[in-house]
Image (cartoon, rainbow, N blue to C red):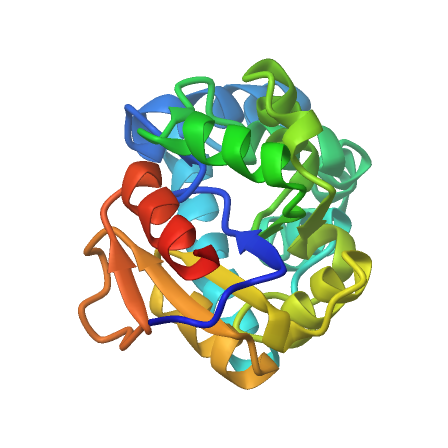
Amino acid sequence: MLPAPRALLLDFGGVIVKSARPEAEEVIPQVVKRVKGLIGGLLSEDEIASELARAQQLRLEFRASTGQELTHEKLWREFVADLWPEDAREKVVAHATELTYAWANRPSWTMIDGVAELLEFTLSVGLPVAVVSNTRCGQAHRDCLERLGLTGAFAHQIYSDEFGVCKPNPEMIRVAAQALWEAPKACWMVGDKRKDVECARQAGAGAAILMGDRDADADPDATVADGHELLKLLKAALA
């Protein structure tokens, strides 16, 4: 039996919402077109898409080695357009937040099964819930939760681009717990990747729970398939 939590910390993608389409189909073409419009014919659409893919790989390596997240300006100046002529680079940097939002936003986001029921329960028993998510642009996540009518279910939202660090850096959980007036050991961290479990372990969270089966090496305290199973687990612990 897991210890009863006094707060829940939920990852965003894979725990609260899911996407119906791959990023390469849903997001990248729109970002590419916007960038091309800003820089003219300097690069083709294929070349811009290649630069975005290169920047994403560099971003992943940067985060893994430093535990830090990129600001929107740093992402475009030093990772996407670092090899471009200065004029083109400055044009995208001037629109860095707009472009990063477009890169992060997924119009196809929908709630994962059981999440609505889970949040109805946490509100009914007064159990605070916070979002703790790595992302290029937290505002895209905030807007999604607003669109889905979920904003009021969360006491706090912590996003890596706004906070400056990213999971598995334990500060993500520590600051979220502090915002809920709880110690990490009183919180369950629910994620869908190994880095969520690692973050929970390093922060001393009360439990590390994995939703889905995307990361077989995560070694969580419990695994759930969706919001329904998480609610069942939560009710059992609170009982």
- Image: 170 above or below 13: below
* Residue 14 percent across, percent down from the top left: 37, 44
Using the rendered image of the protein, determine whether residue 139 is visible from the camera's viewpoint: yes
Number of numbered markers: 0
In this view, the residue in front, 45 or 24, is: 24
- Image: 60 above or below 130: below
Q: Left or right? Give the position of 236 relative to 105.
A: left
Using the rendered image of the protein, determine whether residue 42 is visible from the camera's viewpoint: no
In this view, the residue in front, 78 or 64, is: 64
* Residue 205 percent across, percent down from the top left: 55, 75
Residue drawn at (65%, 73%), measured in percent from left and top? 184
Residue drawn at (35%, 31%), measured in percent from left and top? 114
* Residue 113 percent across, percent down from the top left: 31, 29
Q: Left or right? Give the position of 159 relative to 53.
A: right
**Screen quadrant of the C terminus:** bottom left
Residue 82 picture quarter: bottom right
Residue 226 picture quarter: top left
Residue drawn at (54%, 17%), measured in percent from left and top? 148
Q: Left or right? Give the position of 171 relative to 220.
A: right
